[in-house]
Amino acid sequence: MRALKIIADQSIWNISDALKTLAQTIPLDVTVFPPYEINAEVVRKADVLLVRSSVKVNASLLEGSTLRFVGTATIGDDHIDLDYLSRNHIAFASAAGSSTESVVEYILASLLELHVHDHIDLSKVNIGVIGVGRIGSMLSSQLKKISVHVLHNDPPRQRYENHLAEDSSWQTLPQILQHADLLTLHTPLTYGGFDATHHLINAATLDAFKGRGIINAGRGGIIDNQALLAWLNHDVSRFVILDCWENEPAISAELLASTQVVLATPHIAGHSVDGKAANTAYVFKALAHFLQQGVQWEYHHLMPKSQRLLVHDHLTYPTVWHRLHAYVEQAYPIVDDHLNFRASLMGAGPESIKNTFNQLRKAYPERRSWSCHTFAPSQNGSPIDKICNNHLTSLGFIPQS
Protein backbone atom coordinates (compact mmCIF):
# COMPACT_ATOMS: atom_id res chain seq x y z
CA MET A 1 0.00 0.00 0.00
CA ARG A 2 1.42 3.39 -1.02
CA ALA A 3 2.06 5.77 1.85
CA LEU A 4 -0.38 8.68 2.00
CA LYS A 5 1.59 11.87 1.31
CA ILE A 6 0.70 14.68 3.71
CA ILE A 7 1.97 18.27 3.61
CA ALA A 8 1.37 20.09 6.89
CA ASP A 9 1.89 23.66 8.11
CA GLN A 10 4.28 23.64 11.06
CA SER A 11 2.26 26.39 12.75
CA ILE A 12 -0.52 23.87 13.47
CA TRP A 13 -0.20 23.02 17.16
CA ASN A 14 1.46 19.61 17.67
CA ILE A 15 0.46 18.43 14.20
CA SER A 16 3.40 15.99 14.04
CA ASP A 17 2.27 14.29 17.24
CA ALA A 18 -1.28 14.03 15.94
CA LEU A 19 -0.19 12.47 12.65
CA LYS A 20 1.97 9.93 14.49
CA THR A 21 -1.29 8.59 15.92
CA LEU A 22 -2.76 8.27 12.42
CA ALA A 23 0.43 6.58 11.21
CA GLN A 24 -0.29 3.71 13.59
CA THR A 25 -3.19 2.66 11.35
CA ILE A 26 -2.08 3.52 7.79
CA PRO A 27 1.31 4.27 6.17
CA LEU A 28 2.03 7.99 5.95
CA ASP A 29 4.66 10.15 4.29
CA VAL A 30 4.51 13.38 6.29
CA THR A 31 6.46 16.57 5.60
CA VAL A 32 6.01 19.63 7.80
CA PHE A 33 6.88 23.04 6.32
CA PRO A 34 6.84 26.65 7.51
CA PRO A 35 3.77 28.25 5.91
CA TYR A 36 5.82 30.48 3.60
CA GLU A 37 7.46 27.38 2.07
CA ILE A 38 4.19 25.72 1.10
CA ASN A 39 3.99 26.33 -2.64
CA ALA A 40 2.69 24.64 -5.79
CA GLU A 41 5.79 22.48 -6.20
CA VAL A 42 5.58 21.22 -2.61
CA VAL A 43 1.89 20.42 -2.92
CA ARG A 44 1.85 18.92 -6.42
CA LYS A 45 2.26 15.24 -5.49
CA ALA A 46 0.54 15.35 -2.09
CA ASP A 47 -2.72 13.65 -1.13
CA VAL A 48 -3.48 15.81 1.91
CA LEU A 49 -2.76 19.47 2.72
CA LEU A 50 -3.15 20.81 6.28
CA VAL A 51 -2.76 24.57 6.80
CA ARG A 52 -3.59 27.62 8.88
CA SER A 53 -4.75 31.03 7.66
CA SER A 54 -1.40 32.31 6.34
CA VAL A 55 -1.46 29.79 3.46
CA LYS A 56 -3.74 30.86 0.61
CA VAL A 57 -5.30 27.71 -0.82
CA ASN A 58 -6.45 28.50 -4.35
CA ALA A 59 -5.93 27.54 -7.98
CA SER A 60 -2.40 28.94 -8.14
CA LEU A 61 -1.37 26.64 -5.29
CA LEU A 62 -3.36 23.54 -6.23
CA GLU A 63 -3.58 23.46 -10.05
CA GLY A 64 -2.18 20.16 -11.33
CA SER A 65 -1.89 18.63 -7.85
CA THR A 66 -3.09 15.20 -6.73
CA LEU A 67 -4.74 16.50 -3.57
CA ARG A 68 -7.79 14.72 -2.22
CA PHE A 69 -8.23 16.51 1.12
CA VAL A 70 -7.57 20.03 2.46
CA GLY A 71 -7.92 20.87 6.14
CA THR A 72 -7.46 24.20 7.87
CA ALA A 73 -6.83 24.33 11.60
CA THR A 74 -8.70 27.64 11.86
CA ILE A 75 -12.29 28.68 12.50
CA GLY A 76 -12.35 30.88 9.37
CA ASP A 77 -12.01 29.78 5.78
CA ASP A 78 -11.64 33.01 3.79
CA HIS A 79 -8.10 31.89 2.85
CA ILE A 80 -9.57 28.85 1.09
CA ASP A 81 -11.08 28.88 -2.41
CA LEU A 82 -13.98 26.60 -1.58
CA ASP A 83 -15.43 26.79 -5.11
CA TYR A 84 -12.15 25.49 -6.53
CA LEU A 85 -12.10 22.60 -4.07
CA SER A 86 -15.69 21.71 -4.89
CA ARG A 87 -15.14 21.85 -8.66
CA ASN A 88 -12.12 19.57 -8.34
CA HIS A 89 -13.76 17.12 -5.90
CA ILE A 90 -11.28 17.88 -3.10
CA ALA A 91 -12.71 17.22 0.35
CA PHE A 92 -12.46 20.08 2.86
CA ALA A 93 -12.65 20.48 6.63
CA SER A 94 -12.13 23.44 8.94
CA ALA A 95 -11.92 23.74 12.70
CA ALA A 96 -15.03 25.94 12.86
CA GLY A 97 -16.12 26.38 16.45
CA SER A 98 -12.94 25.03 18.00
CA SER A 99 -11.46 28.24 19.42
CA THR A 100 -14.72 30.11 20.02
CA GLU A 101 -14.18 30.14 23.78
CA SER A 102 -10.71 31.66 23.43
CA VAL A 103 -11.92 34.55 21.26
CA VAL A 104 -14.78 35.28 23.66
CA GLU A 105 -12.33 35.37 26.57
CA TYR A 106 -10.19 37.85 24.61
CA ILE A 107 -13.20 40.15 24.19
CA LEU A 108 -14.24 39.86 27.84
CA ALA A 109 -10.70 40.59 29.05
CA SER A 110 -10.64 43.60 26.68
CA LEU A 111 -13.92 44.94 28.05
CA LEU A 112 -12.67 44.71 31.63
CA GLU A 113 -9.52 46.62 30.62
CA LEU A 114 -11.68 49.29 29.02
CA HIS A 115 -13.72 49.59 32.22
CA VAL A 116 -10.82 49.88 34.67
CA HIS A 117 -9.21 52.53 32.44
CA ASP A 118 -12.46 54.54 32.28
CA HIS A 119 -13.17 54.10 28.57
CA ILE A 120 -16.55 52.49 29.29
CA ASP A 121 -18.82 51.70 32.23
CA LEU A 122 -19.89 48.07 31.97
CA SER A 123 -22.91 48.78 34.16
CA LYS A 124 -24.28 51.24 31.59
CA VAL A 125 -22.72 50.47 28.19
CA ASN A 126 -24.66 49.16 25.17
CA ILE A 127 -22.43 46.67 23.37
CA GLY A 128 -23.34 46.05 19.73
CA VAL A 129 -22.41 42.55 18.56
CA ILE A 130 -22.20 42.51 14.75
CA GLY A 131 -22.25 38.92 13.53
CA VAL A 132 -24.11 36.58 15.87
CA GLY A 133 -22.82 33.18 14.83
CA ARG A 134 -20.82 30.86 17.07
CA ILE A 135 -18.56 33.51 18.59
CA GLY A 136 -21.09 36.34 18.66
CA SER A 137 -23.71 34.10 20.25
CA MET A 138 -21.37 32.85 22.97
CA LEU A 139 -20.15 36.38 23.66
CA SER A 140 -23.72 37.66 23.93
CA SER A 141 -24.61 34.84 26.32
CA GLN A 142 -21.60 35.51 28.54
CA LEU A 143 -22.26 39.24 28.65
CA LYS A 144 -25.88 38.68 29.65
CA LYS A 145 -24.77 36.36 32.46
CA ILE A 146 -22.77 39.21 33.99
CA SER A 147 -25.55 41.76 33.40
CA VAL A 148 -24.01 43.70 30.49
CA HIS A 149 -26.51 45.02 27.96
CA VAL A 150 -26.15 43.65 24.43
CA LEU A 151 -27.54 44.62 21.01
CA HIS A 152 -27.35 42.25 18.04
CA ASN A 153 -26.94 42.62 14.29
CA ASP A 154 -26.87 39.69 11.89
CA PRO A 155 -28.82 40.33 8.66
CA PRO A 156 -29.00 36.70 7.44
CA ARG A 157 -30.34 35.50 10.78
CA GLN A 158 -32.73 38.44 11.01
CA ARG A 159 -34.16 37.60 7.57
CA TYR A 160 -34.69 33.91 8.19
CA GLU A 161 -35.44 33.64 11.92
CA ASN A 162 -38.85 35.25 12.29
CA HIS A 163 -38.87 35.27 16.09
CA LEU A 164 -35.98 37.76 16.15
CA ALA A 165 -38.27 40.47 14.81
CA GLU A 166 -40.02 40.49 18.20
CA ASP A 167 -36.78 41.08 20.11
CA SER A 168 -35.78 44.75 20.29
CA SER A 169 -32.13 43.82 20.92
CA TRP A 170 -31.90 42.65 17.27
CA GLN A 171 -31.34 45.72 15.14
CA THR A 172 -30.47 46.73 11.60
CA LEU A 173 -27.00 48.09 10.95
CA PRO A 174 -28.23 51.73 10.85
CA GLN A 175 -30.05 51.16 14.14
CA ILE A 176 -27.15 49.57 15.96
CA LEU A 177 -24.82 52.33 14.75
CA GLN A 178 -27.18 54.79 16.43
CA HIS A 179 -27.75 52.90 19.68
CA ALA A 180 -24.51 51.07 20.53
CA ASP A 181 -21.73 52.67 22.55
CA LEU A 182 -19.21 50.07 21.42
CA LEU A 183 -19.15 47.63 18.49
CA THR A 184 -17.52 44.20 18.48
CA LEU A 185 -17.19 42.48 15.10
CA HIS A 186 -17.66 38.75 14.51
CA THR A 187 -18.73 38.28 10.89
CA PRO A 188 -16.95 36.18 8.29
CA LEU A 189 -15.07 38.12 5.60
CA THR A 190 -17.05 37.97 2.34
CA TYR A 191 -16.63 40.05 -0.80
CA GLY A 192 -19.81 39.53 -2.77
CA GLY A 193 -23.52 39.00 -2.40
CA PHE A 194 -26.23 40.70 -0.43
CA ASP A 195 -24.41 40.41 2.89
CA ALA A 196 -20.81 41.17 1.83
CA THR A 197 -18.74 42.17 4.86
CA HIS A 198 -15.53 43.47 3.26
CA HIS A 199 -15.23 47.07 4.52
CA LEU A 200 -18.58 46.74 6.27
CA ILE A 201 -17.18 49.35 8.64
CA ASN A 202 -16.16 52.13 6.26
CA ALA A 203 -16.13 55.93 6.19
CA ALA A 204 -19.93 56.10 5.82
CA THR A 205 -20.72 53.66 8.63
CA LEU A 206 -18.15 55.27 10.90
CA ASP A 207 -19.69 58.66 10.22
CA ALA A 208 -23.10 57.23 11.23
CA PHE A 209 -21.77 55.52 14.37
CA LYS A 210 -22.72 57.45 17.51
CA GLY A 211 -20.58 55.39 19.87
CA ARG A 212 -16.89 55.80 20.69
CA GLY A 213 -15.35 52.32 20.63
CA ILE A 214 -14.78 49.35 18.30
CA ILE A 215 -13.25 45.92 18.89
CA ASN A 216 -12.17 43.79 15.95
CA ALA A 217 -11.22 40.21 16.73
CA GLY A 218 -12.99 38.90 13.64
CA ARG A 219 -11.36 39.54 10.26
CA GLY A 220 -9.12 42.48 9.40
CA GLY A 221 -10.84 43.39 6.14
CA ILE A 222 -14.20 43.98 7.82
CA ILE A 223 -12.90 47.47 8.67
CA ASP A 224 -11.44 49.91 6.17
CA ASN A 225 -8.33 50.63 8.24
CA GLN A 226 -7.59 53.96 6.54
CA ALA A 227 -11.12 55.15 7.25
CA LEU A 228 -10.73 53.88 10.82
CA LEU A 229 -7.56 55.92 11.31
CA ALA A 230 -9.28 59.05 9.99
CA TRP A 231 -12.23 58.40 12.34
CA LEU A 232 -9.89 58.12 15.32
CA ASN A 233 -7.95 61.23 14.37
CA HIS A 234 -11.16 63.24 14.21
CA ASP A 235 -12.00 62.78 17.91
CA VAL A 236 -9.50 61.94 20.67
CA SER A 237 -12.25 60.33 22.80
CA ARG A 238 -12.63 57.49 20.28
CA PHE A 239 -10.79 54.21 20.77
CA VAL A 240 -10.35 50.80 19.19
CA ILE A 241 -9.02 47.38 20.13
CA LEU A 242 -7.52 45.53 17.18
CA ASP A 243 -6.51 41.89 17.05
CA CYS A 244 -7.32 41.62 13.33
CA TRP A 245 -5.82 44.07 10.83
CA GLU A 246 -6.29 44.75 7.17
CA ASN A 247 -3.53 43.33 4.92
CA GLU A 248 -1.97 41.12 7.60
CA PRO A 249 0.93 40.74 8.16
CA ALA A 250 1.68 44.00 6.28
CA ILE A 251 -0.36 46.07 8.73
CA SER A 252 -0.56 49.85 8.92
CA ALA A 253 2.32 51.22 10.98
CA GLU A 254 0.44 54.51 11.33
CA LEU A 255 -2.64 52.79 12.77
CA LEU A 256 -0.51 50.72 15.14
CA ALA A 257 1.22 53.89 16.38
CA SER A 258 -2.06 55.59 17.28
CA THR A 259 -2.47 55.95 21.05
CA GLN A 260 -6.23 55.53 20.46
CA VAL A 261 -5.59 51.90 19.57
CA VAL A 262 -5.74 51.12 23.28
CA LEU A 263 -5.06 47.39 22.84
CA ALA A 264 -3.21 46.03 19.81
CA THR A 265 -2.40 42.35 19.29
CA PRO A 266 -1.18 40.21 16.35
CA HIS A 267 -4.30 38.13 15.54
CA ILE A 268 -3.99 35.92 18.62
CA ALA A 269 -7.47 36.14 20.16
CA GLY A 270 -8.09 32.48 19.39
CA HIS A 271 -4.57 31.41 20.38
CA SER A 272 -5.15 29.93 23.81
CA VAL A 273 -3.43 26.57 24.07
CA ASP A 274 -6.86 24.99 24.48
CA GLY A 275 -8.09 26.70 21.32
CA LYS A 276 -5.05 25.66 19.30
CA ALA A 277 -5.31 22.09 20.60
CA ALA A 278 -8.97 21.99 19.62
CA ASN A 279 -8.07 23.35 16.16
CA THR A 280 -5.70 20.43 15.59
CA ALA A 281 -8.10 17.90 17.08
CA TYR A 282 -10.96 19.05 14.80
CA VAL A 283 -8.86 18.71 11.66
CA PHE A 284 -7.37 15.39 12.79
CA LYS A 285 -10.85 13.97 13.42
CA ALA A 286 -12.07 15.15 10.00
CA LEU A 287 -9.05 13.63 8.24
CA ALA A 288 -9.40 10.33 10.10
CA HIS A 289 -13.08 10.23 9.13
CA PHE A 290 -12.23 10.97 5.48
CA LEU A 291 -9.71 8.12 5.51
CA GLN A 292 -12.20 5.86 7.31
CA GLN A 293 -9.83 5.35 10.22
CA GLY A 294 -11.44 4.94 13.63
CA VAL A 295 -8.57 6.44 15.56
CA GLN A 296 -8.51 9.21 18.18
CA TRP A 297 -5.70 11.59 19.08
CA GLU A 298 -5.11 12.07 22.81
CA TYR A 299 -3.41 15.37 23.52
CA HIS A 300 -4.26 16.31 27.09
CA HIS A 301 -0.86 15.17 28.39
CA LEU A 302 0.69 17.86 26.16
CA MET A 303 -1.21 20.72 27.82
CA PRO A 304 0.50 23.07 30.30
CA LYS A 305 -0.80 23.31 33.85
CA SER A 306 -3.47 25.85 34.77
CA GLN A 307 -3.27 28.06 37.84
CA ARG A 308 -5.15 28.93 41.00
CA LEU A 309 -6.32 32.54 41.02
CA LEU A 310 -6.14 34.63 44.17
CA VAL A 311 -7.23 38.14 45.09
CA HIS A 312 -6.32 39.55 48.49
CA ASP A 313 -9.47 40.12 50.52
CA HIS A 314 -8.04 43.14 52.33
CA LEU A 315 -7.97 45.15 49.07
CA THR A 316 -10.87 47.47 48.29
CA TYR A 317 -12.30 47.55 44.76
CA PRO A 318 -14.56 50.43 43.65
CA THR A 319 -16.78 48.20 41.50
CA VAL A 320 -17.40 44.51 40.89
CA TRP A 321 -15.75 45.01 37.49
CA HIS A 322 -12.48 46.08 39.10
CA ARG A 323 -12.48 43.01 41.34
CA LEU A 324 -13.38 40.75 38.41
CA HIS A 325 -10.57 42.32 36.41
CA ALA A 326 -8.11 41.52 39.21
CA TYR A 327 -8.92 37.82 38.81
CA VAL A 328 -9.14 37.75 35.01
CA GLU A 329 -5.81 39.46 34.39
CA GLN A 330 -4.10 36.60 36.25
CA ALA A 331 -5.59 34.09 33.81
CA TYR A 332 -5.01 36.31 30.80
CA PRO A 333 -2.85 39.45 31.18
CA ILE A 334 -3.95 40.88 27.85
CA VAL A 335 -1.98 44.09 28.38
CA ASP A 336 1.24 42.05 28.20
CA ASP A 337 0.29 40.98 24.67
CA HIS A 338 -0.36 44.59 23.75
CA LEU A 339 2.90 45.92 25.18
CA ASN A 340 4.96 43.16 23.58
CA PHE A 341 3.33 43.78 20.20
CA ARG A 342 3.88 47.53 20.35
CA ALA A 343 7.45 47.23 21.57
CA SER A 344 8.30 44.71 18.85
CA LEU A 345 6.87 46.72 15.95
CA MET A 346 7.21 50.39 16.82
CA GLY A 347 9.51 52.13 14.35
CA ALA A 348 9.92 49.03 12.20
CA GLY A 349 9.91 49.19 8.42
CA PRO A 350 7.33 47.39 6.24
CA GLU A 351 9.32 44.17 5.76
CA SER A 352 10.26 44.01 9.42
CA ILE A 353 6.61 44.54 10.42
CA LYS A 354 5.54 41.59 8.27
CA ASN A 355 8.20 39.26 9.63
CA THR A 356 7.73 40.31 13.25
CA PHE A 357 3.94 40.03 13.06
CA ASN A 358 4.27 36.43 11.88
CA GLN A 359 6.95 35.62 14.43
CA LEU A 360 4.86 36.94 17.32
CA ARG A 361 1.99 34.69 16.28
CA LYS A 362 4.29 31.70 15.93
CA ALA A 363 6.00 32.25 19.30
CA TYR A 364 2.87 33.24 21.22
CA PRO A 365 3.17 32.30 24.93
CA GLU A 366 0.99 29.61 26.44
CA ARG A 367 -2.43 30.78 27.63
CA ARG A 368 -5.02 28.44 29.13
CA SER A 369 -8.79 28.82 28.79
CA TRP A 370 -10.60 30.13 31.84
CA SER A 371 -12.41 26.84 32.40
CA CYS A 372 -9.01 25.34 33.33
CA HIS A 373 -8.47 27.75 36.24
CA THR A 374 -9.71 27.53 39.80
CA PHE A 375 -10.29 30.58 41.96
CA ALA A 376 -10.45 31.13 45.68
CA PRO A 377 -13.81 32.81 46.37
CA SER A 378 -13.74 35.79 48.69
CA GLN A 379 -14.91 35.07 52.21
CA ASN A 380 -15.72 38.70 53.07
CA GLY A 381 -19.37 38.38 52.20
CA SER A 382 -19.66 41.92 50.79
CA PRO A 383 -22.09 42.51 47.89
CA ILE A 384 -19.22 43.16 45.46
CA ASP A 385 -17.50 39.93 46.52
CA LYS A 386 -20.63 37.83 46.16
CA ILE A 387 -21.43 39.22 42.71
CA CYS A 388 -17.82 38.77 41.58
CA ASN A 389 -17.81 35.13 42.72
CA ASN A 390 -21.01 34.53 40.74
CA HIS A 391 -19.61 36.28 37.66
CA LEU A 392 -16.41 34.23 37.77
CA THR A 393 -18.42 31.02 37.89
CA SER A 394 -20.65 32.24 35.04
CA LEU A 395 -17.56 32.93 32.92
CA GLY A 396 -16.27 29.39 33.37
CA PHE A 397 -13.78 29.68 36.22
CA ILE A 398 -13.99 26.84 38.74
CA PRO A 399 -14.61 27.82 42.38
CA GLN A 400 -12.28 26.11 44.79
CA SER A 401 -14.27 24.20 47.37
Image: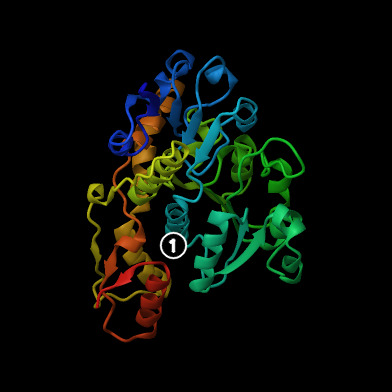
Q: In what quadrant of the picture does the C terminus appear? A: bottom left
Q: Position of residue 147 (x, y in %)?
A: 52, 74
Question: Which of these two is toward me, 13 or 323?
Answer: 13
Residue 253 appears in the figure: no
Taking the spot 40% from the left edge, 77% from the top edge, the residue there is 390
Q: Nearer the viewer, residue 401 or 129?
A: 401
Quadrant (top left/top right/bottom left/bottom right) for the N terminus: top left
Task: Report the residue that reaches farthest toward the bottom.
Answer: 381
**Residue 82 versus residue 170 in the image, above or below:** above
Mark 1 closeness class: few <14, some 14–19, many ≥20 residues within 10 Å: many
Residue positioned 47% across, 30% down in the render: 54
The spot of residue 143 in percent (x, y) is: 52, 67
x and y, in percent, of residue 230 in the image: 63, 39
Hey, which quadrant is residue 172 in on the image?
bottom right
In the rendering, at what x and y percent does residue 276 appear? 37, 45
- Residue plotted at (54% across, 46% down): 218
Q: Give the answer, above or below, for where 353 lies relative to 165.
A: above
Task: Judge whether residue 176 can be spotted in this image.
Answer: yes
Q: Circle 1 sits on which residue?
A: 112
How many circles with numbers are drawn on the protein? 1
Dot 1 amino acid type: Leu
